[in-house]
Image: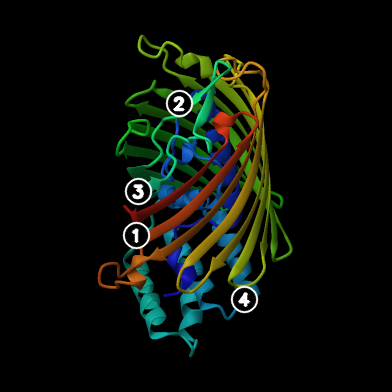
Amino acid sequence: MSSLKQYLNLKEFNLLRFLTGLALFICLFTNSALSSEKNITYMQILQKPNDLDLNLKYAQQQGKMGNFKQTISTLERLNMLYPENVEIKLYLLSVLVQVDSPEKAYTIIEEMKLRRDLDPEDLETLLEIEEGLKDREPSLWNLTADISVGGVYTDNVNSVSKTRLQSTSDVIGGFNSAKYDRTLSGGLGLSASRPIGEESSFLINLNHTSSEQHQETDDDFQSYGLTFAFDTTLGNQSLSPYYMLSKSDYQTDADSFSNMYGIGGFFTVGERNSFSYGYSFADSKGNHNSTDDTAMDTNSISHGFTLGHDYILTEIISTSFSLGYSDTDARVDAGNDYETYDVGFGLNFAFPWAYIAVSNAVGFNDYKKEDTSVNSNKLRSDYTNTFDIMLTKAIGDIFPTIDPNRSLFINLSYEKMISEANILNYDYISDSFSISFSRSVRLN
């Protein structure tokens, strides 16, 4: 089946850059509020840095985010650039069906019926979509459910230093925490979106994630999220303001609460280039109680900025480049206040047989005050290099009888993180492997 149709639930890269920046800054303030967190799964995008593959999975898990305008405009532009590409037409057609735009959909259907080079499989899909359009009643709201399950295995779950040593109150001792562990997780998201006029849309998303760590309990938690987003156009700028609320219930740590608001945007230059940008403000708090009497020490606020550029090299290959900066200020400054600078580059391959994304990101963390509980003589400074590769494939391409509509996806990924720091506690290497299955189901 055509590659673009396979990835119906993946957002265009312009919107993806916005989500990448969004996830990055959620991660920054959450890590400050929850310093005890060691290992974070791909499902926990709200606590994960800005690597590309995880944000793609986040976009899949969240499903249709309501920003259909960007998706449609990009596909229409690609359709003009590559008028003979059947995959682009099928992808565009699928999105038009989702947003109840039958006029445009019927135009594409009639155009494709005239093609003599259409594969029998694509023709069958086309006729199924046409039949579905005839039976569908127009609806004001689009309701979808997004379901996902997965697992992560890591060889350094507690970020144990390379030397197996750590500094505690200026004293060097053994770093004897466990290194190997695996985490299972599952998620459910419900989205409601509706168009507002011809150029805007509104989204409400409610999601829940459950995580269970095999040996230790640091990653045993339940998380809940509520998102409100508005998508619109101002001149040649596509803008997406948003507001998010989240709560995480940890088994062995204080509950955390956060709220975030911000705006992301992008614009195109020519037919191959697009530029994105974003700003976010985040406020996170830990639940101060009798068993976690220091949880509020890491309460923090964060300001974040992102810039990105995407380039369509060929029908199959595209590139992405990103810059990020954030400033986090916590209630207790020592070891919690820091600035982060990020640079990332990615190569994306939309092969007919699978979607593959390869990325490498470099991050610099500069802390503002010495942490006397670790080392009172050094101001912590970190450098991280994160390489990851992700593959997405529709199950229906392998087992058509199980997934005839190609709406169930398998995601495989590998991540390698190298952390270099001037304090040996944070000098470590970790490798993670993950597998997940995700599906988006239309409810109306």
Name which residue type carries label 3. Answer: Gly
| Lower position in the chain sequence, tag 3 or tag 4 | 4
Q: Residues within 10 Å of mark 2 (few under 14, many from 20)?
A: few
Residue drawn at x 38%, y 47% as measured from the top left: 152
Mark 1 vs mark 3, CA separation in Å: 39 Å
- Foreground label between 3 and 4: 3
Residue of label 4: 82
Residue 325, picture quadrant: top right
| Lower position in the chain sequence, tag 4 or tag 2 | 2
Mark 3 vs mark 2, CA separation in Å: 21 Å
**CB atoms at circles 1 and 3 under 8 Å apart?**
no
Residue drawn at x 40%, y 81% as measured from the top left: 123
**CB atoms at circles 3 and 4 under 8 Å apart?**
no
In this rendering, the answer to whether 284 lies above or below 262 is: above
Residue of label 2: 36
| Lower position in the chain sequence, tag 1 or tag 4 | 4
Residue of label 3: 151
